[in-house]
Image (cartoon, helix red, strand yellow):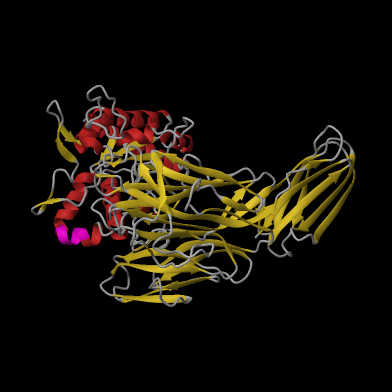
């Protein structure tokens, strides 16, 4: 009765939210939920998190904030800190949660590390990320529920999805997260512990373990492997698996009467992602994203779905196939079986490309929002290059940028040597700088602290990495257009690694943290070096940093195995971005433009310290004058001046305002 009352109150609260404000669904958890890249270069096997697929089923303006993080447990998501003691994950989600929001909470996969052992042993404190389900796991779930409620939001617990492990025709107990017995005889049953928390705290819960277990057992082990866990291991999901598990969760929420105004479990045309953001790109350069497509209960039952791309974009049903303005899928029985199509952004004219891809069978039309910007940059080339073939391993720099030195967390330098006598370089004969690569080329060989790789790692460990970075000098903009490195394993084929970049030193901000290389779900041959490249533009404003981290782990317990790195490159173009110059006097002339990035119109806001004439001048980065505006005898006060660059070409403009003995210069980016 108590539980039913809680769900009723939850339904009333969420219906009230529907009438008053936009709903955000925040998700916290591990790699089975988190946001994966949709481009096939950094994510070649198409791995997805199930929470990532939720927007396909969201309606009435609900939005997703997927903050799940690979490699975290209920404990480490709450407690993990950086080298300065700043908490990295949960503490950065809390400020984003507003009253009326909903938070989905799913942990257990990484809580199972060290088999539920979390206490000291032989006087040595336990410092890992694992938890016992009846102790720390329960403690941290309780913390999340209480803290979400304190923010005026609603927590919903989700038991963990199953792994692809079998006993006969059934998912095994361990794959369903009941991994044994602890030292005092309690079952190490994480779903059971979460259910108890839900009951004790009157919290809504979705038994995702039971739902995914039943689904896998219905289709059998063979199809579970080929359809659900088809990305190289028995834990992580492919596109179909993630979509299916998201749908199971949505159906159960609707069954319970939760979020019914915001969720639709049976949309007729399903596309994921629901929008594509390409960011900045040079003219005639291209970037490709993968989109999943399926359809159910379509009308007419037999027909053709046409996918049409707008200017600057083309589509194909094959990643390496021919790209055209439109493609078609013929379907029968009202069903489009899950498939993929690919969208290429290749602009030929400088400007913004904000539009939609249309999917239509003449009866039903769906739109996939796409956005990108084509730019040209005139500035100074700049780069940081760590060859990593000899001590001290420092970077060679060119241009006006600062280098953040290589650093380690729970990793140490072993040596500079070739990975092995039979080293091969996948698809390369020369490095990014033209140096010949051969079996004898030395690399930087790094090993885990203590030299012993633990058993059970299946994804990144957030405090185990090798880091590189660059910094944009104050008063400049560093547009990074190329990132690359080579990585591989020496002495065995069990080395795995992923590469991430971020402008956030915590690597917790999903808007700036991107996985650019995944060598974690594929076998890496011993003594073979693999390239990782990323060519999407990343803009660093003056003072901002870009960090690159390599997160290694080993597929089994091993000693002395090293991850080999070579040729880390970060390069791009630096342009000036003046922040204001005071010539003489003591009072500053304050000015800024809003928006700073515009399709044409912006507003210059300025505050005069004294009565004076004002001269406003707008010039292109190349020095060509676009506008001159004179204001006579203005009083000391705040002013606004409309700036219209609609008739001018795209690019960077410098807007200067001169008043008496003062001048300030602000930067405008014209799309």
Q: Is residue 484 left or right of residue 27?
A: right
Quadrant hosting residue 273? bottom left
Residue shown at 29% from the left, 66% from the top: 297
Residue 366, percent from left and from top: 42, 65
Residue 485 counted in the magenta span: no
Q: What is the residue that sits farthest to the left in this orientation?
A: 168
- Extreme-top residue of the structure: 123
Q: Is residue 22 above or below residue 480?
A: above
Q: Quadrant of the C terminus?
A: bottom right
Secondary structure, magenta segment, majority class? helix
For the point 49% across and 47% down, which residue is it? 391
Q: Is residue 258 left or right of residue 326?
A: left
Q: How many marks?
A: 0
Residue 34, image x, y percentages? 37, 48
Q: Which residues are magenta?
A: 221-225
Q: Quadrant of the N terminus?
A: top left
């Amino acid at each position: 009765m108590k539980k039913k009352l809680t769900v009723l109150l939850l339904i009333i609260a969420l219906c009230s939210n529907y009438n008053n404000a936009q709903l955000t669904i925040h998700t916290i958890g591990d790699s089975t939920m988190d946001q994966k890249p949709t481009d096939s270069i950094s994510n070649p096997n198409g791995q997805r998190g199930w929470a990532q697929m939720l927007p396909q089923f969201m309606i009435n303006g609900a939005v997703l904030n997927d903050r799940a993080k690979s490699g975290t447990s209920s404990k480490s998501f709450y407690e993990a800190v950086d080298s300065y003691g700043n908490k990295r994950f949960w503490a950065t989600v809390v400020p984003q949660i507003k009253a009326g929001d909903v938070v989905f909470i799913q942990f257990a996969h990484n809580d199972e590390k060290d088999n539920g052992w979390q206490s000291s042993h032989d006087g040595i404190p336990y410092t890992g990320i694992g938890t016992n389900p009846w102790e720390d796991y329960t403690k941290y779930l309780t913390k999340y529920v209480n803290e979400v409620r304190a923010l005026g939001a609603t927590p919903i617990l989700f038991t963990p999805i199953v792994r692809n492990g079998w006993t006969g025709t059934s998912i095994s107990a361990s794959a369903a997260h009941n991994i044994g017995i602890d030292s005092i005889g309690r079952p190490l049953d994480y779903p059971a512990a979460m259910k108890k928390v839900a009951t004790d705290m009157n919290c809504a819960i979705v038994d995702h373990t039971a739902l995914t277990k039943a689904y896998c057992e219905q289709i059998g082990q063979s199809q579970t492997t080929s359809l659900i866990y088809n990305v190289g291991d028995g834990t992580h999901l492919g596109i179909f698996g993630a979509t299916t598990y998201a749908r199971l969760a949505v159906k159960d929420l609707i069954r319970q009467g939760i979020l019914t105004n915001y969720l639709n479990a049976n949309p007729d045309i399903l596309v994921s992602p629901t929008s594509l953001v390409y960011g900045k790109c040079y003219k005639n350069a291209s970037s490709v994203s993968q989109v999943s497509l399926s359809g159910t209960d379509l009308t007419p039952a037999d027909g053709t779905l046409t996918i049409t791309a707008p200017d600057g974009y083309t589509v194909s049903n094959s990643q390496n196939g021919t790209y055209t303005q439109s493609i078609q899928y013929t379907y029968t029985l009202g069903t489009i079986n899950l498939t993929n199509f690919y969208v290429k952004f290749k602009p030929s004219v400088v400007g913004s490309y904000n539009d939609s891809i249309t999917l239509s069978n003449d009866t039903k039309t769906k739109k996939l929002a796409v956005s990108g910007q084509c730019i040209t940059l005139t500035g100074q080339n700049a780069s940081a290059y760590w060859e990593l073939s000899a001590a001290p391993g420092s970077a060679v720099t060119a241009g006006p940028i600062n280098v953040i030195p290589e650093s380690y967390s729970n990793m140490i330098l072993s040596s500079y040597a070739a990975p092995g006598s039979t080293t091969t370089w996948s698809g390369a004969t020369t490095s990014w700088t033209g140096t010949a690569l051969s079996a004898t080329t030395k690399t930087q060989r790094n090993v885990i602290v203590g030299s012993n790789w633990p058993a059970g790692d299946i994804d990144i460990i957030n405090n185990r990495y090798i880091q590189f970075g660059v910094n944009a000098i104050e008063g400049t903009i560093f547009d990074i257009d190329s990132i690359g490195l080579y990585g591989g394993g020496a002495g065995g084929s069990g080395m795995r690694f992923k590469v991430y970049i971020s402008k956030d030193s915590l690597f917790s901000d999903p808007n700036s943290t991107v996985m650019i290389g995944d060598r974690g779900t594929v076998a890496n041959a011993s003594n073979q070096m693999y390239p990782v490249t990323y060519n999407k533009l990343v803009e660093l404003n003056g003072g901002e940093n870009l960090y690159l981290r390599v997160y290694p782990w080993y597929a089994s317990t091993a000693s002395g195995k090293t991850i080999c790195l070579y040729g880390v490159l970060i390069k791009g173009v630096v342009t000036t971005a003046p922040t204001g110059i005071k010539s003489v006097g003591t009072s500053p002339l304050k000015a800024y433009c809003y928006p700073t990035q515009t399709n044409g119109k912006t507003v210059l806001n300025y505050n005069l310290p004294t009565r004076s004439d004002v001269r406003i001048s707008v010039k292109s980065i190349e020095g060509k004058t676009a506008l001159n505006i004179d204001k006579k005898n203005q009083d000391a006060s705040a002013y606004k001046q409309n700036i219209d660059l609609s008739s001018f070409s795209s690019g960077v403009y410098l807007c200067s305002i001169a008043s008496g003995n003062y001048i300030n210069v602000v930067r405008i980016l014209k799309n």
